[in-house]
Image (tube, grey):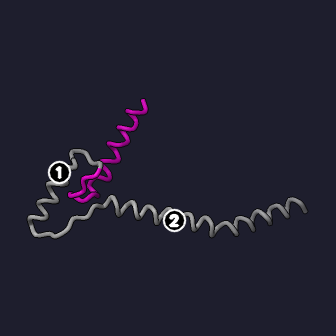
Amino acid sequence: MTDRLQQAMAQVLMTVYDPMFLQHSYGFRPNKRGHDAVRQAKCFLNQGHTWVVDMEKRIEKLNQYLVGWLGYYQLAETPSICKQLDSWMRRRLA
C-alpha cells in the first residue's frame, strides 16, 4: 500500500517539478543515467567548453552552511526563550 502511495506521489511531484530542471540535469531523474551525463559532458568539451561542474559537492557544502546557520539561529534564540520561560514561571509562582 505505501509503495503505491509513494509511486503516486512521485508521479504527481515529477510532473510538477521536472519541467523546472535544466535539460542537462541528470541526477535522480527518469530516463536519465550517469552515462548520459558523461556523454553530454564530453560533447560540451568537444564544443570548446573548458570545465564541467559536479553540483553534488556544491550542494553538500551548501547543506553544511545551512545546517550551521540553523544551529546558530537556534542558539541565538535561546536567551529569548529563557526570558519567556522565566517570566512564565514567575507569573505562576506569584
Instruction: Identify which residue is drawn at 18% across, 49% down.
Output: 35
> Separation of disc 2 and disc 1 at Cα?
35 Å
Above or below residue 14? Residue 47 is below
Which quadrant does the N terminus fall into? top left
Magenta segment: 1-27
Q: x%, y% of residue 57?
A: 34, 61
Residue 42 horizontal side relative to residue 60, left or right: left
Residue 92 horizontal side relative to residue 36, left or right: right
Q: Nearer the viewer, residue 81 or 65?
A: 65
Q: Amino acid at mark 1?
A: Asp
Q: x%, y% of residue 23?
A: 21, 57
Q: Main secondary structure of the magenta part?
A: helix
Residue linked to disc 1: 36
Q: Nearer the viewer, residue 57 or 93?
A: 57
Where is residue 7, by image quadrant? Answer: top left
Q: Amino acid at mark 2?
A: Gly
Residue 68 horizontal side relative to residue 25, left or right: right
Instruction: Identify which residue is drawn at 25% across, 56% down.
Output: 25
| Sequence-first disc among 2 and 1 | 1
Q: Secondary structure at mark 1?
A: helix
Residue linked to disc 2: 68
